Image (tube, helix red, strand yellow):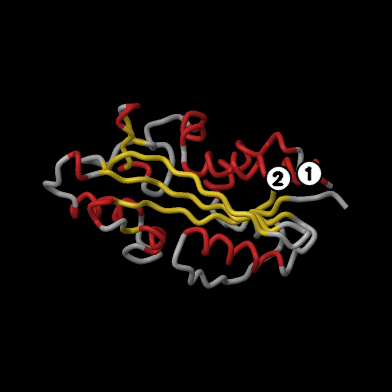
Amino acid sequence: MEKRIIFATGNQNKMKEIHMILADLGMPIYSMKEAGIDIDIVEDGTTFEENAQIKAKAIAKYLPDDIILADDSGLEIDYLNKEPGIYSARYAGVDTSYDIKNQMLLDRLKGVPDEKRTARFVCAIAAAFPDGTVETVRGTIEGMIGYEIAGEHGFGYDPIFYVPEYGCTTAEMDPVQKNELSHRGRALRAMRAIMEVKEREE
């Protein structure tokens, strides 16, 4: 049976990034929905890594022959004690649009100077392998919170996440450049290296 990668997300934007970064692994990549899995997973971990592992292990029970990848990612703003952190997706309510979430964070940082607006995107990815092992990696990108919503690319908090050395937000970068720099891109490439080693060992 052909080995598949199942990614524990229903987010089409994430799936696009994942397909771009893992395309050359030579394995078909499916979302959990495409693989026919529709379960509610309670993410009650206290770190990005714990939540990613919870998701990967939950789906591995249903698809033990596949490689299950799960990520947990979010935005940490130093001035706000690393909020929204692991609650990034649920910040101000799950159904609240990111336009509103982004504006709320900009409002909370009103009058805060550049040097105190430091922030990072964090992405932890866990992989549950058919042999029962679970590997976890973390990728980050450092930046700051800008002063306005800017950019049409990306999703989530990208329009307020400003990367000084590139002079723009991650929503103003083209997708290829963003994947090179992004927290998810870095975590996926680290995980790809682990997966390649495991393939060679089999």
| Residue at far top of view | 166
Is 151 situated above or below 97?
A: above
Q: Residue at x 57, y 71 (%)?
A: 40
Q: Position of residue 111 (x, y in %)?
A: 11, 46
Residue matched to label 2: 195
Q: Position of residue 70 (x, y in %)?
A: 59, 56
Q: Is residue 30 left or right of residue 84?
A: right
Inspect the image, locate mark 1, and give the three-letter code of the amino acid beneath it: Glu
Is 177 situated above or below 182?
A: above
Q: Circle 2: is it few (<14), some (14-19), or many (20+) Cα within 10 Å?
A: some
| Residue at far right of view | 1
Could you say whether the residue bearing mark 1 is in a helix, strand or loop? helix
Q: Circle 1: is it few (<14), some (14-19), or many (20+) Cα within 10 Å?
A: few
| Residue at far left of view | 111
Q: Residue at x 71, y 63 (%)?
A: 36
Q: Is residue 140 left or right of residue 120?
A: right
Residue matched to label 1: 199
Is 64 situated above or below 106?
A: below
Q: Residue at x 65, y 41 (%)?
A: 192
Inspect the image, locate mark 2, and give the three-letter code of the amino acid beneath it: Met
Residue at mark 2 to residue at mark 1: CA–CA distance: 6 Å
- In front here: 65 or 199? 199
- In front here: 12 or 47? 47
Marks 2/1 in contact by CB < 8 Å: the verdict is yes
